[in-house]
Amino acid sequence: MNNLRMHILVCGGTGCVSSDSKAVHGRFVAELAKHKMDKEVQVVTTGCFGFCEQGPIVKIYPDNIFYTKVAPADVELIVKEHVVKGRVVEKLLYHDPEKGTSEAEHRHIPFYKSQMRIALRNCGIIDPEKIDDYISVDGYAALGKALESMTPDLVVEEIKRSGLRGRGGAGFPTGLKWDAAKKAAGAKKYVVCNADEGDPGAFMDRSVLEGDPHSVLEAMAICGYAIGADEGVIYIRAEYPLAVERLRIAIAQAEEYGLLGGNILGSDFSFHIRINLGAGAFVCGEETALLNSIQGSRGEPRTRPPFPAQKGLWLAPTNNNNVETYANICPIILKGADWYSSIGTEKSKGTKVFALAGKINNVGLVEVPMGTTIREIVYGIGGGIRGDKKFKALQTGGPSGGCISNENLDLPVEYESLASVGSMMGSGGMIILDEDDCMVNIAKFYLEFTVDESCGKCTPCRIGNRRMHEILERITQGNGTMADLDELKDLGEIIKDCSLCGLGQTAPNPVLSTLRYFYDEYEAHVKEKKCPAGACKNLLKYRVLPEKCIGCTLCARNCPVSCIEGERKKAHVIDSEKCIKCGVCYSKCPVKAIVRD
Amino acid sequence: MSKIKSLDELRKIKEAAKASTDLRTTGENPDRVVLMVGMATCGIAAGARAAMSALLDEISKRNLQNVSVVATGCVGLCYAEPLVEVRVPGRDPIRYGHVNDARAREIIDKHIVQGILLDNAIIGREVPKGE
Ligand SMILES: Cc1cc2nc3c(=O)[nH]c(=O)nc-3n(C[C@H](O)[C@H](O)[C@H](O)COP(=O)(O)O)c2cc1C
């Protein structure tokens, strides 16, 4: 057989790679060779499919069969059954835990049903290391269209009309930004891509770069053409080695084809892109600190104005956008602003990618139209809370964001609606919290992060956040007072008002939003010295119910500090002075005779 | 790789490269025409691989869009293998038996391109729904 009849796509995203997808790929190649089918069946490494929970993912075309959790040992069976004999391997299909059925095609899986892919359009379809794959799905056609038939003004106008807003957190209209950089006077201008992705739990940008690096390069070139820049810099965190590697390959391939470099596509437009590895600080994701970092200076934010559009990199007019923002550009140029602005809500157009993490069944990457409700994302796509626990809150916006409680589950996801309940869109991390998570503790966790990451340049952020953290520490230790709660609020507001950059201006948000929606939990910590979620160890007390204890000695034998005493077949006692509250006895007790309060 | 000097040249590369990803994009389309080739032991022994080759060859020669050729298992009609089932969305599936190279090419030419069934080759025609 001379014609390729089948493609086997193996996910090469970081999630699947860490669960051995490279070995899966290797086994496919070996098995196909064994069956002499290597000429008719092709094995392709792709970017992330999003359904990381079920990885490694393998997808087979043209049958369009979606296999989940494929181990290297499963490959022999897939080749023998599916590839050779055309029989779908039932046991590797996705099993719907609710309906008890299995689904062969991904679009019938609830996780994918209400998704819509624009930024992630090519992830899981093309080989990110082959520029021809990208070109085959209209890659570089948008750049070609812009160069051949659009003036820079028209490009900016199209982006403006599309309603696209920045996906890096602040939601600033992208077209206006480009316009400002275009109008700024200067012979030398820069296009910067912010791929620092510092929010804990976020991996949207990484997946775009790993799965479809050319889409970002092409968009940066279009931006360069629009604003009159000939140089682009991608600032990417060094902790993303796979994304960096794929970007390097992509840039080299685009240069070879002349799609980056001098006189692109025979025009007089030239554009070069280079990669700058991040310095590993969260604040370097803030755009002015990022610019300083590229220049080799300390990653400290600058005072604005002047904005980067006027004085950016090396003080030249600069446009900076987030990875996902750029990933939306080419479809807008190709399909038009009207198409794009028909998706989403009045003020938030298009789609947004979210990284679902925490206590949710389907951890993964999802892209939904703006306006989708939180309930749909958590319960429809996300498959609900892990282990049938109760939903408590959704954390969005990372350390700058806040927590959304049960009562706002039907909120549509948009920039304004999230801000109205004290959270924010942020870059797209969504962390799901359940009844076992203590909201005071969560607020403390995020604040700890910002205290660590504060660059120290301005006082409110450097000192104010530390004071807030100390208060939270007190509360979770059981030493808080009601006056502390007022103090947290006051300090939080002051820090927000007085800080120099977005880091300080938003750092108190996790505390303020949990104070707003979970005040009773703070109160319980202060007044009753209790942690309702049972997460703050210092407030916990373990004791044995003598009437229930059967004296099996299991707890005593497992206690790591030997603080449980008692004779066989008699009730045991915990010495709370010595107890380290590890909870081992609590989980070991066969008759639930140990209580935690 | 040589440099691409115009949008036209880019389009040419796209056309050439499409062959490699068409299999995937067509596979995603719920409205595609699917040709199912029986590739279980019985099918392969009777020459299903030659039939599949001929189908693929004919499709690529004619540059047909939106047609997938998919291997499938044994449906129990081993005596009539190689079997090719044609599934056009919204229509009843048609199953052809004893498909050799020539018949495979005829299926593409008559059924897929011209919309004419190969009456003499149809096996166990399914009773149309609702009649
Ligand atoms: C502390 C801090 C960290 C930030 N980190 C990131 C980041 O990792 N990635 C990002 O794109 N934007 C980050 N931003 C937002 C950028 O300053 C900037 O608004 C964004 O890159 C602009 O691109 P956009 O308009 O496409 O969203 C951060 C902002 C602050 C204040």
Image: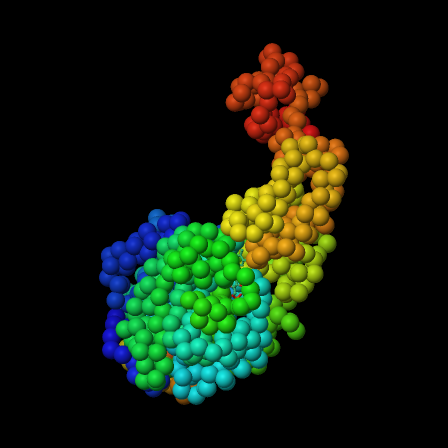
The quarter of the picture where the C terminus of chain A appears is top right
Number of dots carrying numbers: 0
User: Which quadrant of the rendered structure holds the N terminus of chain A?
Assistant: bottom left
Q: Answer above or below: position of A241 versus B118.
A: above
Residue A49 shows in this picture: no
Image coordinates of residue A461 in percent, x first then y, are 59, 50
Q: Position of residue A352 (x, y in %)?
A: 56, 65
Residue plotted at (50% across, 85% down): A154
Q: Is residue B93 left or right of residue A265?
A: right
| Location of residue A431 in the rendering, given as x and y in whole percent from the top left corner | 58, 51
Q: Nearer the viewer, residue A22 or B70?
A: A22
Q: Is residue A469 among what the camera can see?
A: yes
Above-or-below relation of A73 to A168: above
Residue at image coords 39%, 66%: A233
Q: Residue furthest top?
A: A567
For residue A293, side relative to residue A303 (left or right)? left
Pick whichever, A234 or A180, lies toward us.
A180
Indicate the quadrant where residue A31 lies: bottom left
- Residue A65 place in picture, x, y as percent: 44, 63
Q: How is the image coloured?
A: rainbow
* Residue shown at 34% from the left, 85% from the top: A267
Query: Foreground: A539 or A56?
Result: A539
Foreground of the two, A42 or A431: A431
Place residue B53 in its image quadrant: bottom left
Q: Quadrant of residue A83?
A: bottom left
